[in-house]
Image (tube, helix red, strand yellow):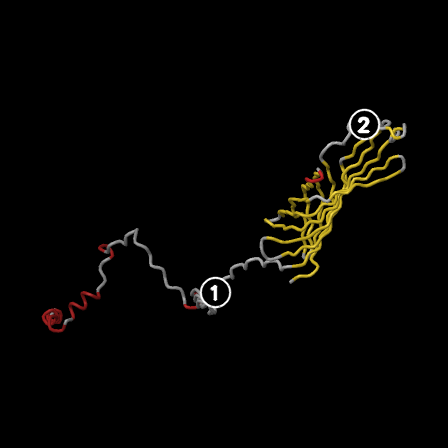
Amino acid sequence: MKHAAYLLALAPLLGVAPALAQNTPPPASVADPAPASAPVAAEPAPASEAAPAAPAPIEPAPVAPVAAAPAAPAPAAPAREPASLELFGSLSLSIAQGEPANPGWTNSFRRVGAYGEAGVAYRSKYFLDPFVSVGYGSLASGDTTLPDSDTLINGEPAYTAGTVHQHLGMWLISPGVTADIWRFRLRFGIGLGIVKESNRFHGEGNTATQLPLAWQTGLAFNCYQVPRFRLDAEARFVQAKGADVTFWTIGVTGRGDLVTF
């Protein structure tokens, strides 16, 4: 008892009592139960089972800057065709106007014929192109039956009944100009016409010739074109007023460059 009394008396000095009080476990009856909802801390995984470290990010390779493409040049204007010395030729159907001289005695009459032409032109770089051409047309023909002549020579008729075979043809020598508008070509020319009317009666033939002033105008459309060659469809009107000859033509014209400048 004396020893216990000494210890209690010296406890404040030695600090033993608090240490004993702290280290002494509380009775089981007074221990607070652990709350059911408190999470249980997971034990750290051992170092050997730790997740593998994420790979280091791969840096993209540097890309060289792409130079901007130069702007496309503006399309150049189409080159103008060179000037040239052009040869041309045409072949057409012709339709003559007018009526036969003696329609009551005419057995047959043909007004549909053919017209051909050849010429040379200078195709300039400007609007008008001069040309000169020579053409010939077989324009009309017919047969006329004539009765005996009323004129008497020595008591005989000047001619006896028979059939006259007639033919009308014309040469045309014409300088002129043409003008191209897109694929259309306008033509105008004026020159000399040589009109020939042939008659054959009872086996004898004779020809009458006139030299009137004649003019022509036309409109063509270019249907086909390659370098140095062109093909046109063309319609024309031709008149030799002094000889009372008028006709239309429709046909094709071929044009080729002989020399270019």
At 32% from the left and 55% from the top, the residue drawn is 39
Is 146 rendered above or below residue 259? Answer: above
Q: CA distance from mark 2 to mark 1?
A: 90 Å
- Answer whether residue 140 is visible to the viewer in this image: yes
On-image quarter of the N terminus:
bottom left
Q: Provide residue 164's location: percent of width, then percent of height.
A: 84, 33
Task: Say whether marks 2 and 1 touch (CB < 8 Å).
Answer: no
Q: Residue lying furthest bottom in this view? A: 14
Is residue 172 or residue 199 the one in the foreground?
Answer: 199
- Answer whether residue 115 is visible to the viewer in this image: no
**Mark 2 or mark 1, which is nearer to you?**
2
- Would you say 219 lies left or right of 50 here? right
At 72% from the left and 46% from the top, the residue drawn is 172
Q: Residue lying furthest left in this view? A: 9
Q: Secondary structure at mark 1?
A: loop
- Three-letter code, disc 2: Trp
Residue behind mark 2: 105
Disc 1 crowd, CA 10 A, few/some/many (<14, 14-19, 20+) = few
Residue behind mark 1: 68
Is 137 rendered above or below residue 60? Answer: above
Q: Provide residue 122's location: percent of width, then percent of height.
A: 65, 56
At 86% from the left and 39% from the top, the residue drawn is 205
Is residue 50 or residue 242 the one in the foreground?
Answer: 242
The image quadrant that residue 229 belongs to is: bottom right
Q: Provide residue 13's location: percent of width, then percent of height.
A: 11, 73
- Three-letter code, disc 1: Ala
Disc 2 crowd, CA 10 A, few/some/many (<14, 14-19, 20+) = some
On-image quarter of the C terminus:
bottom right
- Would you say 7 lies left or right of 52 here? left
